[in-house]
Amino acid sequence: MDFDLTPEQARFREDLRGFLDAEVPVEKQEVFGMLTEEQYQFGRGINRKLAERDWLAVGWPREHGGGGKGPIEQGILAEDLGYRRVPKSGFIGLGIVGPAIRVFGSPEQKEQYLPPIARGEVEYCQGFSEPNVGSDLASLELRAERRGDEYVLNGFKMFTSYAYHADYIYLLARTDPQAQKHRGISLFIADLKTPGISLQPLLYINGEMAAQTFFDDVHLPLSCLIGEENRGWYHAMTTLDYERSGLGIYGSVRRVFDDFVDFCQQPAPDGGRALAEHPLVRHQLAQHRLAMENWKLLCWKVAWWQSSGAVPNAEASVAFLYGTEQRFKFAEMAMEVLGPYATLRHGSPLAPLLGNIEGIHREAMHLHGAGIMEIHRNIIAQRGLGLPR
């Protein structure tokens, strides 16, 4: 792995940071656990401005609407958007749907779906989990029955993040109920305005509004199928590795950690010692600083693998698992150090760090996004270490 950026990549990072410093003032930055509608719309606006510079999909080929660079530049963008706490918008399209279409989509699908994502014009949500299907995703029950030149979908999905902002849903459905469970699943993109699709609100612990998504005789043309019929499981697992590299999440957590270190170095309001002068606190800060650096390197290793043309699998799960655990450990440590004040939310005049510690602690308990930790341990054991099932 090469740890150095090329001069061109370094210039891109410098230009990007200058843009973000000018366009994303502190009062517009996202606070953990408090994404508001105003912040979401601000984030979409930033995405459109990035797209005007060919930066939003900087790592995509130009024929797909991108900036013609590669995974390293896309990683620089993700990390800096996270570190500047730019409110999240469009990341499912950029990080999951776009790569899936680039790898498995037809030329017509690439022309239809990729440029609007690269321009920041559309939002996607993901329809994978179901009420009775979480970790064992291959047991999903949403049916997609082929009838002539269309598919008819019946069933429903759970935990559909960003459904109320989305234009399209990227989903898995069972197309062959007689096949082995991994081999009878197909991958689709559906317009959420399609008759028969309805939503019911589902509030997350981190304050975001998700949905239960219902499909009642939803008719989709054959052109909505991504890749091969009954191969959707394998298509989806390949592209999920792009989500699991985690540079955006790392950047946002690292920003809160750096702010927390600065806070601990300030003298106490009553003139007492700074928190960082206490040996135990200083020891904990040093441990977590090392862990943050390890997390960063694991994420960049995934981006480096992608830049070399490989599709990292176990490596992506290593980065995701390590980061998920580190975020939770840091949140717990910060709550303990700050005591009762750490429980105050954004808006309280006494909340330290704008309430980000309380917010990151809540978000850190959301442990099932992109697969629960046990799933990633299995991926690492079986695909990375070659251990038996």
Image (cartoon, rainbow, N blue to C red):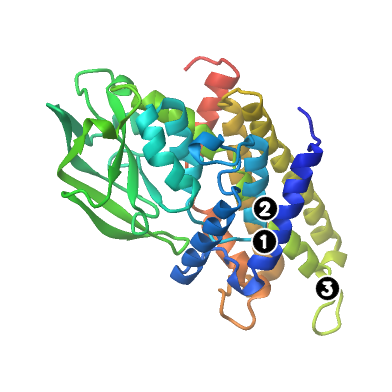
Point out which mark residue 20 bears.
1
Q: Amino acid at mark 2?
A: Asp
Q: Which residue is mark 3?
A: 266
| Viewer-proximal residue among 109 and 240 | 109
Q: Secondary structure at mark 1?
A: helix
List x then y, in percent, for residue 183.
31, 20
Q: Is residue 95 above or below residue 50?
A: above
Is residue 11 in view?
yes
Residues under numbered marks 3 and 2 in contact, where contact means CB atoms less than 8 Å apart: no
Name the residue rendered at 61%, 33% in the picture. 318
Q: Dot 2, how many residues are within 10 Å of its Cα: few (below 14), some (14-19), or many (20+)?
A: many
Which callout, 2 or 1, points at the residue further toward the start of the chain? 1
User: Mark 1 and mark 3: span between their CA atoms?
Assistant: 27 Å
Q: Is residue 322 above or below residue 146?
A: below
Q: Which residue is mark 2?
A: 80
Instruction: From the viewer's perspective, tell me whether residue 120 is left or right of residue 199.
Output: right
Which callout, 3 or 2, points at the residue further toward the start of the chain? 2
